[in-house]
Image (spheres, rainbow, N blue to C red):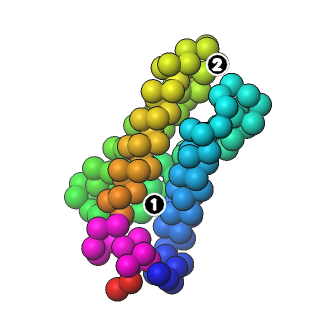
Amino acid sequence: MSLAPLLDAAPAIPFHAFAAMAAFVLGLVQFAAPKGTLPHRTVGWIWVILMAGIAISSFWIHQLRLLGRFSPIHLLSIFTLAMLPLAVWRAHRHQVDAHRRTMTSLFLGALVIAGLFTLLPGRIMHAVVFGH
């Protein structure tokens, strides 16, 4: 395992990857911790900011070019940017079940599933985890 391929990449890529790793860890904390508390809300806001940063930074990452400079993964970024405020609004309105479903879906789709795709051969994270 070596961070060199990640650190040698364009600046948006390490930012994107490290923010995703932090969001993943914070997401696990959120699942395990008590809900509705001040720490849950504080960590939740940090998670939302990280997720927005991940989604926004993706627009400067063009490793997979299927639609001009973009790929279908950028649709996930647009979806994430739309769902984050909706999830926050649902929490604010005390729509707990809807808030939980939205946040869980973002965690699983935008972090877990998308993250697994970064481990495919030829991707930077594959080189980080498994070597060249």
Q: Measuring 36% from the left and 73% from the top, which residue is drawn there? A: 126
Q: Amino acid at mark 2?
A: His
Q: Position of residue 76 (x, y in %)?
A: 37, 44
**Pointer 1 or 2: first along the chain:** 1
Identified by mark 1, the residue type is Trp
Q: Which residue is mark 1?
A: 60
Viewer can see residue 59: no
Give the residues in magenta.
119-130
Name the disc covering residue 92, or none: 2
Whether residue 127 is in magenta: the answer is yes
Query: As displayed, is residue 118 above or below residue 123?
Result: above
Residue located 50% across and 33% down the image: 103
Q: Give coordinates of residue 35: x percent, y percent.
A: 65, 28
- The quadrant in which residue 63 appears is bottom left
Quadrant in the picture for the C terminus: bottom left
Residue 73, image x, y percentages: 33, 51
